[in-house]
Amino acid sequence: MTDLSHPAVQRIVEVAARKGIALEIQMVPGEDGDTDLGQIVKSVVFVAPRPGDELATIVCLISGRDRVDPGSVAAVAGEVSVRPATARETSALTGYAIGAVPPFGHGRDVRIVMDQDLCSNQWVWAAAGTREARFRIAPRTLRMLANAVVAPLAHESWTHEAEQMTQRLALDAGANA
């Protein structure tokens, strides 16, 4: 388990402190316990190709229950196309491993886009640079710290899609009765 003095965690704390925000980092081993998936901030990294094999980096902040729609990311970022970053690209472009990418403090110029659904929560939980380190924050404060653009990024949630599929199956079964 990582401790609070880990350099990745300290980088996040320092970035927030420079903007006048004191983060309370908590170490959460394993899964996020009984935190609602809608309150967990996933930082999903996308890249857009540039001339000379360069890549523009876009970090998408989205609810733990949702999937990012790449078409929406491209539209919001003003890119022709985007693709998910590989694990190696994620680490190289953000300075963090997949599962530990925080919403800010990436050490290089990246664009941050935050899904509008996160704003409906009073509090959300985000990674603080390691897989175990998390912090609780109000979405409006998160948006400010990350200098994020807020836009719709999510496909419909898995739950909503499953409910729709169940309803369609029930309708089909009723029509065949």
Image: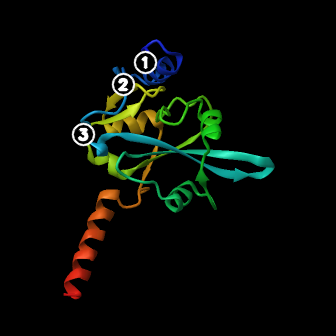
Q: Are marks 2 and 1 in contact (CB under 8 Å)?
A: yes
Say which residue label 2 marks.
Answer: 29
Q: Residues within 10 Å of mark 1 (few under 14, many from 20)?
A: few
Vertical order, 155 against 137 (above or below): below
Q: Amino acid at mark 1?
A: Met
| Label 2 neighbour load within 10 Å: few <14, some 14-19, many 20+ | few
Marks 1/3 in contact by CB < 8 Å: the verdict is: no
Numbered mark located on residue 122 in the image: 3
Where is residue 140, by image quadrant? top left
Tell me: 4 left or right of 36: right
The span from disc 1 to disc 3 (Cα, nearest Å) is: 29 Å
* Contact flag, marks 3 and 2 (Cβ < 8 Å): no
In primary-sequence order, the first of circles 1 and 3 is 1
The residue positioned 27% from the left and 48% from the top of the image is 120
Q: Position of residue 168 (x, y in %)?
A: 27, 76
Residue 138 pos. (x, y %): 30, 35
Report the number of discs: 3
Tell which residue pokes out farthest to the bottom in this image. Answer: 176
The residue carrying mark 1 is 1
Q: Secondary structure at mark 1?
A: loop
C-alpha separation, residue under disc 2 versus residue under disc 1: 7 Å
- Is 139 on the left-hand or right-hand side of 10? left
